[in-house]
Image (spheres, helix red, strand yellow):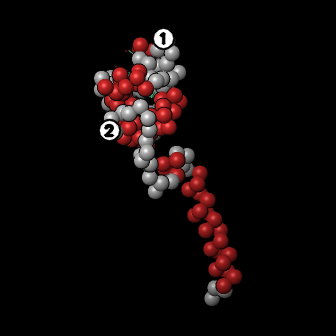
Amino acid sequence: MMTIAKIIRLIIPLYAIITLLPSCYYDKEETLYPFKACDTTNVTYSQTVAPIIATNCNTCHSGQNPTGKINLDSWPSLTVSVNNGKLVPAIEHTGPFPMPQGGSKLSDCDISRIKKWISNGAPDN
Ligand code: HEC
């Protein structure tokens, strides 16, 4: 017969293993919190899109002499690449120049946010 104490001594380490082990496996926010949906409401140029571009693209595509003569660091210049249809294939890696060049693809959520902004008409907001 198992005493209550024996059962508890068995359950506690099991519980610890089950809860602690998976925490080491994942480092991406989306994997860690699979039920935290990507928030694409209230997407704006200034609050959403510009910071993503600044972090991931401006090292090459900004200033007086941008790489490939493609400037993305302001609304008027970014919308040139939106309107000529090159921005989305670049960030989705479906076009001839996957971006950011030499870096890892933007997160699915950041890509969704940029596409939401574009489908809203890419406003200067
Ligand atoms: C390390 C430098 C670098 C970074 C960072 C970078 N790019 Fe580029 N980008 C390039 C180069 C080089 C080209 C190709 C220019 C050419 O040969 O015409 C290019 C081309 C492009 C093009 C034109 C693609 C086409 O079909 O003609 C777009 C749009 C673009 N980049 C967007 C981005 C975006 C958006 C980001 C950030 C997510 C980004 N780039 C980050 C270097 C970079």
Classify 57 as above or below 27. above
> Where residue 23 sits: x, y (%)?
58, 54
Residue 77 on image: x %, y %:
41, 21
Side (left or right) of 2 relative to 92: right
Horizontal side of residue 18 vs 108, given as left or right: right
Above-or-below relation of 81 to 8: above
Q: From this viewpoint, is residue 93 visible? A: no
Q: Position of residue 106 (x, y in %)?
A: 45, 35
Residue at 52% across / 47% down in the picture? 29
Residue 3, above or below 56: below
- Viewer-proximal residue among 18 and 39: 39
Residue located at (64% from left, 74% from top): 10
SS for tag 1? loop
Q: Position of residue 7 (x, y in %)?
A: 64, 80
**Residue, far top:** 65
* Disc number placed over residue 65 in the picture, else none: 1
Quarter the N terminus occupies: bottom right
Amino acid type assigned to the residue bearing label 2 in the image: Ser
**Is the C-beta of the residue carrying label 2 under 8 Å from the nearest atom of ligand 1?**
no
- Foreground residue among 113 and 6: 113
Locate the C terminus by quadrant.
Answer: top left
Neighbourhood count class around disc 1 (C-alpha, 10 Å): few under 14, some 14–19, many 20 upward: few
Residue at (59%, 51%) from the top-left corner?
Answer: 24
- Name the residue tied to disc 2: 119
- Mark 2 to mark 1: distance in Å? 29 Å
Of the two numbered discs 2 and 1 in the rendering, the one whose residue sits closer to the viewer: 2
Local secondary structure at mark 2: helix
In this rendering, does residue 32 appear at all? yes
Which of pointers 2 and 1 lies earlier in the amino acid sequence? Answer: 1
Q: What amino acid type should be assigned to the residue bearing mark 1?
A: Asn
Horizontally, is 35 left or right of 84 in the view?
A: right
